[in-house]
Amino acid sequence: MGIITDRQMQAKPTAKDQWLTEDGPRGHGRFIGRITKGGDRLFYFRYTGSDGARVTLPIGAYDPTGKTGLTLAHGRTQAGGLSKLYQSGIIDLREHLEAERQLQEAQRTAEQARLDAEQAAQERAAAAASARLTVRDLFERWASVDLIRRKDGGAEVRRMFEKDVLPLIGAIAVEDVRKGHVTGVADALLARGVPRMAKLIFSLIRQMFRFAVDRDIIEADPTASIRKAKIGGKDVERDRVLSEDEIRQLARQTPSAGLTQTTEAAIWIALSTCCRIGELLNARREHVDLERGTWWIPPENSKNGKAHTIHLSDFSARQLARVKELNSASPWLYPDRAGTSAVCDKTVTKQIGDRQRPGLLPMKGRANVALAETLVLPGGRWTPHDLRRTGATVMVSLGVLPEVAERCLNHTEENKVKRIYQRHSYEAEMREAWRLLGDRLDLLTRTDAGNVLTFQRSA
């Protein structure tokens, strides 16, 4: 009797079970220790049940370290708790404990169900959030399906979106985009003073959202209610044509405009061949045959996808020979800095535009401000594409039939009947038209060009 000790609980097993009992107040039940003949050491609480029979209720196994069982102190505390329940009038402890166990189990089950439900809800929310395409995600999908089929694989559109669209709305979920988001992009461009770019980018954004509607990514196009005319004002078709006096002035101004020699040559090639500037900048050396006097533009380089052969005048041949010599180590007439591909289509346009900006103020990273007015002409701002229009206009003023000038421009015949039934190539007429244009430009750009009379074609 007395108090059970750790030494007693750690005694060696014997042939019979050993029972150790702690004395306690009469009628309060007793704390029991047991060492089985097999070496198990267990704790019990012994009390008298409602039927007067003695009940030995298991508490747990003994472990002096408390790692895998109850220490002696812990076992005694457990027995004390049961004794208090017993003294409170709960005679059937076994049933009471089983009811408590079931209640606790039910509570644990309910709590686990609640945690599982919360986790499932969080996972569904995360899945829904990840399934919501952002504008950047939509752009990548559009690029992989539609833009990839463009000549440049969508590189120019990607450049524009990375610069002016995606930084503003790229992280917004597609279904959350509203009209205000789109007009916000356009307004930022208008604030920079580039209305034509605003219109172009708005058109591209509209194409992207219509792509999304066609594939059931969204139900409605957020740009549908935006009138394009409200983005940067009404479209005005450009009709800028350089006069012969302006061509003379341009010949005087280009040497001091700080242009690269190849860019200066590009101006005269575009004017004398009526080519698109992109066709020139993507040309390869092998496409220009100076001996035969031809420049072949492959389908992949032309806007309408049709190959085009330009018969070079002496004037245009000299300019192309100059470019070929300057870039003799590259397969491209206009290679990029790395020499691995053609230069960007915007290169020449930007150089020319930067030299028609009167009143330009110095800014960090800006080139020589003194050159900002070196290519300004009396008729107003001009672009490389205006040179193409100017060349065709000069051709017609020299007596070339408009239909032949259109062929020199590689325009597609709009009249379907003519496209089908008129198969004359006009090759001889086109060769003569380019020759006439080249000879006229040769006169206008000579150092004594001031003596060349500008004439009007008689009606």
Image: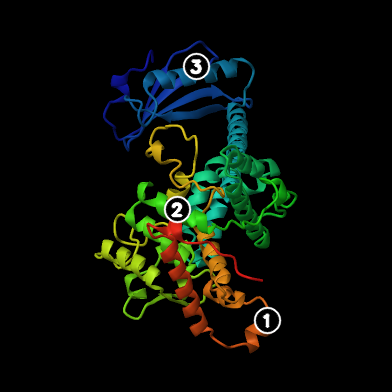
Mark seen at residue 16: none
Amino acid found under the numbered disc labelled 1? Lys
Residue 68, compared with residue 182, is above or below; it is above
Residue 345 at least partly seen: no
Label 2, label 1: how far apart the Cα atoms are: 40 Å
Spot occupied by residue 210 in the image (x, y as percentages of width and height): 66, 58
Residue under pointer 2 = 250
Mark 2 residue crowding within 10 angstroms, few (<14) / some (14–19) / many (20+): many
Between 385 and 74, the one lying in front of the other is 385
Name the quadrant of the C terminus: bottom right
- Judging from the image, what secondary structure is the residue with disc 1 in? helix
* Comes first in the chain, label 1 or label 3: 3
Q: Which secondary structure lies at badge 3?
A: helix
Residue 297 versus residue 244 in the image, above or below: below
Which image quadrant is residue 64 in? top left
Percent position of residue 231, x then y: 67, 46
**Residue denoted by label 1:** 416
